[in-house]
Image (cartoon, grey):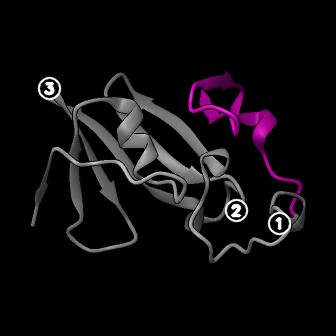
Protein backbone atom coordinates (compact mmCIF):
# COMPACT_ATOMS: atom_id res chain seq x y z
CA UNK A 1 0.00 0.00 0.00
CA UNK A 2 1.26 3.48 -0.82
CA UNK A 3 0.19 6.81 0.61
CA UNK A 4 0.36 9.91 -1.55
CA UNK A 5 0.31 13.34 0.06
CA UNK A 6 -2.23 15.77 -1.31
CA UNK A 7 -0.61 18.89 -2.83
CA UNK A 8 -3.24 21.15 -1.21
CA UNK A 9 -3.03 19.72 2.28
CA UNK A 10 -0.72 17.42 4.13
CA UNK A 11 -3.50 14.95 4.87
CA UNK A 12 -2.47 11.68 3.20
CA UNK A 13 -4.73 9.81 0.84
CA UNK A 14 -4.27 6.05 0.41
CA UNK A 15 -3.90 4.71 -3.10
CA UNK A 16 -2.82 1.48 -4.73
CA UNK A 17 0.92 1.55 -5.41
CA UNK A 18 0.34 0.11 -8.90
CA UNK A 19 -1.68 3.18 -9.90
CA UNK A 20 1.28 5.41 -8.99
CA UNK A 21 3.71 3.64 -11.29
CA UNK A 22 5.37 6.13 -13.61
CA UNK A 23 4.84 6.29 -17.33
CA UNK A 24 8.59 6.23 -17.86
CA UNK A 25 8.68 9.94 -18.63
CA UNK A 26 9.77 12.23 -15.83
CA UNK A 27 8.52 15.22 -17.80
CA UNK A 28 4.95 14.16 -17.04
CA UNK A 29 5.48 14.36 -13.27
CA UNK A 30 7.74 17.41 -12.94
CA UNK A 31 6.02 20.75 -12.51
CA UNK A 32 6.96 23.68 -14.80
CA UNK A 33 9.87 25.68 -13.44
CA UNK A 34 11.10 22.77 -11.30
CA UNK A 35 13.78 20.19 -11.91
CA UNK A 36 14.54 16.86 -10.27
CA UNK A 37 17.51 18.50 -8.54
CA UNK A 38 15.00 20.60 -6.56
CA UNK A 39 13.99 19.19 -3.19
CA UNK A 40 10.59 17.49 -3.37
CA UNK A 41 7.40 19.31 -2.43
CA UNK A 42 4.69 17.65 -0.35
CA UNK A 43 2.93 16.58 -3.56
CA UNK A 44 6.10 14.76 -4.69
CA UNK A 45 6.26 12.49 -1.63
CA UNK A 46 5.21 8.83 -1.85
CA UNK A 47 4.99 6.78 1.36
CA UNK A 48 5.25 2.99 1.17
CA UNK A 49 4.20 1.05 4.24
CA UNK A 50 6.84 -1.56 5.07
CA UNK A 51 5.36 -2.73 8.39
CA UNK A 52 3.17 -1.42 11.20
CA UNK A 53 6.10 0.74 12.40
CA UNK A 54 8.26 1.32 9.27
CA UNK A 55 7.75 3.43 6.13
CA UNK A 56 9.84 4.11 3.00
CA UNK A 57 9.72 7.70 1.70
CA UNK A 58 10.18 8.21 -2.05
CA UNK A 59 10.16 11.03 -4.59
CA UNK A 60 7.28 10.22 -6.93
CA UNK A 61 8.88 12.31 -9.73
CA UNK A 62 11.38 9.45 -10.14
CA UNK A 63 10.14 6.01 -11.28
CA UNK A 64 9.73 3.44 -8.48
CA UNK A 65 12.15 1.14 -10.29
CA UNK A 66 14.97 3.70 -9.84
CA UNK A 67 16.73 3.39 -6.46
CA UNK A 68 17.34 7.16 -6.50
CA UNK A 69 13.63 7.66 -5.83
CA UNK A 70 14.15 6.56 -2.19
CA UNK A 71 14.63 9.62 0.03
CA UNK A 72 14.79 7.75 3.32
CA UNK A 73 12.88 5.84 5.96
CA UNK A 74 10.72 6.49 9.00
CA UNK A 75 10.58 4.08 11.93
CA UNK A 76 8.43 4.39 15.04
CA UNK A 77 10.75 3.82 17.99
CA UNK A 78 9.27 4.23 21.44
CA UNK A 79 7.25 7.44 21.51
CA UNK A 80 9.09 9.03 18.57
CA UNK A 81 9.37 8.72 14.81
CA UNK A 82 12.98 8.27 13.72
CA UNK A 83 13.77 9.73 10.29
CA UNK A 84 16.76 8.45 8.33
CA UNK A 85 17.45 10.65 5.32
CA UNK A 86 19.62 9.11 2.62
CA UNK A 87 20.81 12.52 1.40
CA UNK A 88 23.33 12.90 4.23
CA UNK A 89 25.41 10.52 6.26
CA UNK A 90 24.50 9.94 9.90
CA UNK A 91 21.44 12.12 9.59
CA UNK A 92 18.90 10.74 12.07
CA UNK A 93 16.13 13.05 13.24
CA UNK A 94 13.37 12.35 15.78
CA UNK A 95 9.84 13.75 15.65
CA UNK A 96 6.93 13.51 18.05
CA UNK A 97 4.40 12.78 15.29
CA UNK A 98 4.28 11.05 11.92
CA UNK A 99 3.15 14.15 9.99
CA UNK A 100 6.23 16.16 10.96
CA UNK A 101 8.48 13.20 10.20
CA UNK A 102 7.07 13.03 6.64
CA UNK A 103 7.24 16.82 6.23
CA UNK A 104 10.98 16.68 6.95
CA UNK A 105 11.47 15.22 3.45
CA UNK A 106 9.66 18.13 1.78
CA UNK A 107 11.11 21.47 0.72
CA UNK A 108 7.84 23.27 1.44
CA UNK A 109 8.11 23.06 5.23
CA UNK A 110 10.80 23.39 7.86
CA UNK A 111 9.66 21.27 10.82
CA UNK A 112 11.42 21.37 14.17
CA UNK A 113 13.03 18.10 15.19
CA UNK A 114 12.69 16.76 18.73
CA UNK A 115 16.38 15.82 18.73
CA UNK A 116 19.33 14.82 16.59
CA UNK A 117 21.79 11.95 16.88
CA UNK A 118 25.25 12.55 15.43
Q: Residues within 10 Å of mark 3 (few under 14, many from 20)?
A: few
Q: Earlier in the sequence, mark 3 or mark 1?
A: 1
Q: CA distance from mark 3 to mark 1?
A: 38 Å
Residue marked by disc 3? 79
The image position of residue 13, as x and y in percent, is: 65, 23
Left or right: where 118 falls relative to 31: left
At x 76%, y 35%, the residue is 18
Q: Are marks 3 and 1 in contact (CB under 8 Å)?
A: no
Quarter the C terminus occupies:
bottom left
Q: CA distance from mark 2 to mark 1?
A: 7 Å
At x 31%, y 27%, the residue is 53
Residue marked by disc 1? 26
Pick the residue in front: 80 or 73: 80
The image position of residue 15, as x and y in percent, is: 70, 25
Give the residues drawn in magenta, as a range. 1-24
Left or right: where 74 falls relative to 107: left
Please tell me whether residue 33 belongs to the stretch shown in magenta.
no
Residue 62 - label: 2
The image position of residue 78, as x and y in percent, is: 12, 27
Q: Earlier in the sequence, mark 2 or mark 1?
A: 1
Q: In this rendering, which labeled residue sits more in front, label 3 or label 1?
A: 3
Amino acid sequence: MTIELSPRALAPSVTNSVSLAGTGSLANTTLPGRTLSDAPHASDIRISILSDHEWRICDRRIPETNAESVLGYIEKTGGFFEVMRLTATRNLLYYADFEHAVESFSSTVAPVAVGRVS
